Image (spheres, grey):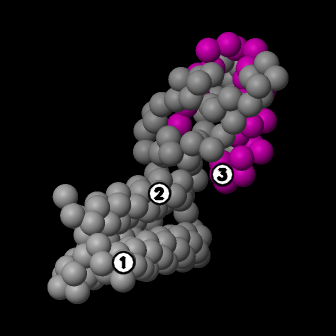
Amino acid sequence: MSMVDDVLADLHGNMEVVINSLKADLGKLRTGRASLALLDGVRVDYYGTPTPLPQCANLAVADARLITVRPWDKNMVPAIMKAISAADIGITPQSDGEVIRLPVPALTEERRKDLVKQGKHRGEEAKIAMRNHRRDANELLKESEKDKDITQDDLKKGLEKVQTETDNGIDKIDQILAAKEKEILSV
């Protein structure tokens, strides 16, 4: 495997990380439908230890607008409700003492447009990260050519492949953003 192939493999791996990170970020944007991704960042004070919510309760999407949280220990209901409220996800928890219900309210048009803006901002940050990885790969290739590890022809082909890889990554980001925008704007 040549130096160019190594650089391209690293670039591809870095771009996959950026895309997966963007997908995770966009998954946390509330779309008006119930999704367990909304609760990803919630940490509960579980006997003195901040614990991710899925590790101290069963989570389920009961229907399109309702998430249910069933704590394994009924004494944890107040702590879980407090953690969900503190997470500021825009949902008010309701409890009957055993099960916590999280009704996901419908989004207003203004809120939908704001969420689309947030999604586009996160997409732009991902594109910037892609371009930074492209710059790093190009610098590595140019340095390798300067050190006589690769030829000028290899450098030219490598730079073209790096640009192609970057273009593909940015196209993926655009597709992900378009799908998320459609999901947010659908009523």
Question: Which residue does the image show at 40% across and 61% down from the upper left?
Answer: 14
Amino acid type assigned to the residue bearing label 1 in the image: Asp
Asked if residue 13 is positioned above or below residue 185 in the image, the reply reads above
Q: Is residue 66 left or right of residue 133?
A: right
Q: Quadrant of residue 85?
A: top right
Residue 171 in sight here: no
Q: Quadrant of residue 135?
A: bottom left
Asked if residue 37 is positioned above or below residue 158 in the image, the reply reads above
Amino acid type assigned to the residue bearing label 3 in the image: Ile
Q: Find numbered disc 2 in the image and state the secondary structure of the residue it sits on.
A: helix
State the residue in front, 76 or 127: 127
> Looking at the image, do the residues carrying marks 2 and 3 touch, with CB atoms under 8 Å apart?
no
Give residue 2's position: percent from left, percent from top.
Answer: 21, 64
| Residue at numbered disc 3 | 89
Give residue 72's position: percent from left, percent from top.
Answer: 62, 15
Q: Mark on residue 81? A: none
Give residue 147's position: percent from left, percent from top.
Answer: 36, 77
Q: Mark on residue 147? A: 1
Give the residue at the far front of this rendering. Answer: 148
Amino acid type assigned to the residue bearing label 2 in the image: Ser
